Image: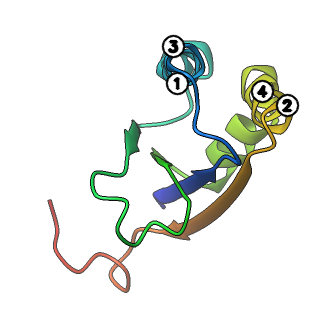
Amino acid sequence: MTVQHIVLFSFPRELSAADAAQMRAMVASWPELIGTMTKCRLGTDLTQARSRGYSHLLYTEFPDLPALHAYQAHPVHVEFLDWLAARECAPLAFDYYLDEHTVLMPE
């Protein structure tokens, strides 16, 4: 059953242009280097009106829970977690199944 994994990222200081580009490049490499996901998106908040300090959102989908767990344990993802920790990022993650109870408007 498909799993959606969403993460919001809050950094204590605004990312430099170089850091923002590095973050994007790291995430963009995951479909090829990790390969367990079926969707991968990374965006920044447009208005900052109600973001409560969260500046970036990661949206990924996985075919099942074992694929999510493989992604989380993958060395490339662990390296990204270390990168976030070095920048004192406070991520907020949420995982759930996409099923008849959660999909309110099919694609």
- Name the residue tied to disc 2: 86
Residue at the location (52% across, 57% down)?
A: 6
Q: Position of residue 47 (x, y in %)?
A: 28, 58
Of labels 3 and 4, earlier in sequence is 3
Mark number displayed over residue 83: 4
Please state which of residues 39 and 16 is positioned toward the viewer in this rendering: 16
Q: Is residue 11 above or below residue 2?
A: above
Of labels 3 and 2, earlier in sequence is 3
Please state which amino acid type lies under the numbered disc 2: Ala
Mark number displayed over residue 32: 3
Secondary element at tag 3: helix
Residue at the location (54% across, 57% down)?
A: 54
- Name the residue tied to disc 1: 20
Mark number displayed over residue 87: none
Q: Nearer the viewer, mark 3 or mark 2?
A: 2
Please state which of residues 51 and 74 is positioned toward the viewer in this rendering: 51
* Label 2 CA crowd tier, 10 Å (few <14, some 14–19, many 20+): few
> Answer yes or no: do the residues labelled 3 and 2 have beta carbons within 8 Å?
no
> Answer yes or no: do the residues labelled 1 and 2 have beta carbons within 8 Å?
no
Residue at the location (28% across, 51% down)?
A: 46
Please state which amino acid type lies under the numbered disc 4: Trp
Of labels 3 and 1, earlier in sequence is 1
Distance, label 1 to label 2, CA atoms, is 14 Å
Distance, label 3 to label 1, CA atoms, is 20 Å
Left or right: residue 61 versus residue 86 is: left
Q: Position of residue 107 (x, y in %)?
A: 14, 59
Left or right: residue 39 versus residue 28 is: left
> Answer yes or no: do the residues labelled 3 and 4 have beta carbons within 8 Å?
no
Secondary element at tag 2: helix
